[in-house]
Image (cartoon, rainbow, N blue to C red):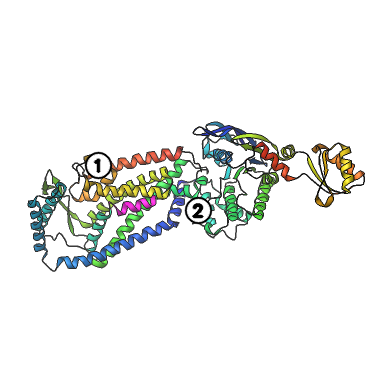
Amino acid sequence: MRFAGLVENEILKISRQRRFRVVVLILIALIGLIVFAQSKGRDRYLGGKDWRVRTQERMASIQNWLRDGRMPASSQRWARFELGRLEYHLERDIDPDAISGPLFTRAFANASSYLLLPLLAIVFASDIVSAEFQQGTIKILLTRPVGRVRVLASKLAALMLAITLTTAFGALVAYAFGGIAYGYRGWGAPVLTGFRIGGERFDPAAVRSIALWKDTILVFGLAWFAMLCVGAIGLLTSVLLRSTAAAMGTMLAALIAGTILPRLASQWEAQKFLFVTCLPLPDYYSGSPPPIPGLTIGFAAAVLAAWAAAALVAAFIVFARRDVLA
Amino acid sequence: MLVAEHLTKRFGRREAVSDVSFTLHAGEVLGFLGPNGAGKTTTIRMLVGLARPDSGRIRIRGLDVATDFRRAMTHVGSIVESPDLYRYLTGRENLLHFARMLPEGAEERVESLAAMVSMRERLDDRVSTYSLGMRQRLGIAQALLGNPDVLVLDEPANGLDPAGIREIRELVRRLAGERGIAVFVSSHLLSEVELMCDRVSIIHRGRTLASGNVHELLDRFAGDRLLVRARPAALAAEMLSAFGAADVEASGGGGDLVSARVDPSRVPDALRELVGAGVDVYSVERPASSLEDAFLQITGGETV
């Protein structure tokens, strides 16, 4: 009867299913692999050169590409931005490539925010209602003296908790593994953030320097927010499709389309209203140029929130009203 | 305890349940009999609030399921279609899970209910290791967690072996007899309903064909064919003909089996006549096949 008891039920079910252990293992295996591969590749790439020389070389090659003029418009924008970023680091005498365990953790948050973490959110979300239908347990769950809205609300709460724990666990594993390879110290190092493209040009005015730990928390916070929104949309597909495989497949297809679309069709501006395009919030925050004009961090967050809210409203209405048959 | 009035449910154009009504009293077992696809499960889904009737009303202890769902459900325990539980959890975890969805006190009943359905020993094993009979019993324990006044069981005998069926049947009789629980049991097996229920409602193609006391109803459908094993058979046949029985026939069974049609109410008199005339009567039965025949007849010959 108590809401806490209902949430406890849902957590029990999530944690006792095999998929929970699979998610934990995926995170450990994947992060381990990334750290290993990165540390190997890095040794070869750096070749012992001084980082200033390296950075200057990189800038020169980017300038060459730009002069070449065969680059697509979207890449040109990126190249100009990267040029500005390197220049800024060089002026300040900061190695743009120096890495530490904490830096790796932050990079992981950034890189995993648009596919890996949302994927894990989907693994939990697509199952949370549809599994009850597939197991037939929905027939008991919805014939107990608890309203359907409360049942779904307890599921939503448990889902949010699972997503939060997954984000935190991912951060912990990234730091643990990153630390092994690059050392555990360096949370206080200043990082530059807020690079912004003003019109066509790099705008140094917006750049601030903040402590790495603050920046990392911010980035994970953004990734977490994006995951919650994906979770809400996943909950809707789970309610609508009543099949875990179908719900997971649908969400997976949407996510992958989201990673492809901005690259293949950057001309189509309306895609900034799609939730998948808005997922890489940390990217937009830390200053990658927006793939589509107008797609700022605030805009992306608002689009995600709107999608999530609409999905939740629809999920609750359908779940509360629809007959449970066969 | 449970009153269903004029229930109708449509799926598209097809009426799965049309104008079905029944009343279930405390301490009574009501059988809901019909062939597969007759609308039994749809009716049950409406009783427990899983599906909304297009018209009609269901009240449980006076509480309307449509408008007072939560309070109505505190008085109901059910197994719909099959005893589905969380297979990756243990029996105990399953019971505790559903106890948490009930008012205070349900968790304390887990042990005693497990003992009642003889599941105590296996309570800490995962449900995936249970047999169907064990899941059925655990399902009943789950349904009883909230101390319900009404128990709804959908085809409880399905997939069980004869010993399992008997166990369930005795449990149901005991719940109705000792605790005064009103039990609603659906089945497509006439013999099952005959043994388990006090009253029966026969449903076919979504409509109620007949309802009433089980034995009266069975008498009505049983027809009047009587099989008497008696010696000497010839004398028995003669006496029965003289008594006014129709279609008297001495047949088979090693020469001492007589078949005749006698009005059910006159069977005791007919037997007295036989015994009075010095005929040794070894057995008298009304062949079950005629019950099945009658049922097939009223349900239009579809599989029972």
Few, some or many C-alpha atoms within 10 Å of disc 1 (few <14, some 14-19, many ≥20)?
Answer: some
- Dot 2 and dot 1 within a common chain: no
Few, some or many C-alpha atoms within 10 Å of disc 2 (few <14, some 14-19, many ≥20)?
Answer: many
Viewer-nearest of discs 2 and 1: 1
Report in which chain the residue with disc 2 lies: B
Q: Nearer the viewer, residue B219 or B251?
A: B251
Q: Circle 2 sits on which residue?
A: B86
Q: Secondary structure at mark 2?
A: loop
Q: Amino acid at mark 1?
A: Gln
Please tell me in which quadrant of the rendered image residue B241 appears. Answer: top right
Q: Nearer the viewer, residue B34 or A226?
A: B34
Residue A207, percent from left and from top:
14, 50
Q: Amino acid at mark 2?
A: Tyr
- Residue A116 is a magenta residue: yes
Task: Work out whether residue A184 can be spotted.
Answer: no
Determine the main secondary structure of the stretch shown in magenta. helix
Q: Circle 1 sits on which residue?
A: A271
Residue A222, percent from left and from top:
27, 49
**Start-end of magenta stretch:** A113-125
